[in-house]
Image (cartoon, helix red, strand yellow):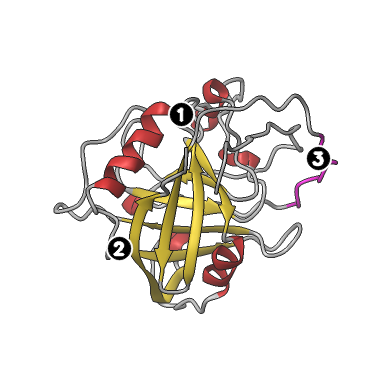
Amino acid sequence: MIGAIMLKRFALAAPLALAFTSPATAQDAKIPAEPAVEEEVMEEAAPEFEATLVVIETTMGDITVALETERAPITAANFLRYADEDRFDGTVFYRAMPLEWGEQPNGLIQAGTQNNPDRILDPIAHERTSDTGILHEHGTLSMARFDPGTATGDFSIMLRKQIGMDADPDNEDPAFHDGYAAFGHVVEGMDVVEAIHAAPTDPDKGEGWLKGQMLAEPVEIVDVRRVEVAE
């Protein structure tokens, strides 16, 4: 039986020199010139927040995630609607972005509807990490987007902390103000996430920053469904 999920906040590490844009709703990145400075992870007060468990069943194994329906209600509800209406079923993990610094493996994997008009729903309002308190940590789920407020049905899973994706309202560069909307965490199946990230990529696929990050053989999402928790 899976009980209540304890979701914790962690101290921030040094900022990353990352800039994310979104061709085809793909979270994109400039690799920083210098590695981020890793700080000791410090657990602070760890209140419980409402979350809904979901299984992402892939051809490489299952990934169980906790969607933060309390702190990121808009983004979590959007993901649940895609799941409940089977809009993710038959889509793929199509991208594995590597980052060469820090603890390995590092980077993210990306999946979703890829703007398929038969699958996507209307864009959702953007929930900034500075408002939700959900940071881009190891195993965090995050929505891909163009401008803030354009996210639909593509999402990424972080392999390591990615502070450059968090909102930074005080940054001198407005491009960093809003960040990306984090809305959940992997609770089981990070080995599957790492296996997808390690799958071969095609050096000729993708454009711009995406070139060389597209999987040679995308990993199919068979089913995305809620986990029924016993009372």
- Residue type indicated by callout 1: Ala
Q: Earlier in the sequence, mark 1 or mark 3?
A: 3
The image quarter containing residue 169 is top right
Gap in angstroms between the C-alphas marked 1 and 3 = 23 Å
- Give the labeled residue for mark 2: 91
Gap in angstroms between the C-alphas marked 2 and 1 = 24 Å
Q: Characterize the magenta stretch by its predominant secondary structure.
A: loop
- Residue type indicated by callout 2: Thr
Magenta highlight on residue 37: yes
Rendered location of residue 145, percent (x, y): 37, 42
The dot on residue 72 is 1
Number of numbered discs visible in the structure rendering: 3
Front-most of residues 216 and 65: 65
**Circle 1 Cα neighbour tier, 10 Å, few/some/many (<14 / 14–19 / ≥20):** many
Gap in angstroms between the C-alphas marked 2 and 3 = 35 Å
Rendered location of residue 70, percent (x, y): 47, 25
Q: Is residue 229 left or right of residue 47?
A: left
Q: Is residue 187 left or right of residue 38?
A: left
**Circle 2 Cα neighbour tier, 10 Å, few/some/many (<14 / 14–19 / ≥20):** many
Q: Secondary structure at mark 1?
A: loop
Q: Relative to residue 63, is residue 50 depicted above or below? A: above
Residue displayed at 73% across by 34% down: 10
The dot on residue 8 is none
Q: Secondary structure at mark 2?
A: loop
Task: Check if mark 2's residue and mark 3's residue have beta carbons within 8 Å.
Answer: no
Magenta highlight on residue 88: no
Task: Check if mark 1's residue and mark 3's residue have beta carbons within 8 Å.
Answer: no
Magenta stretch, residue numbers: 34-42
Residue found farthest to the right:
40
- Give the labeled residue for mark 3: 41
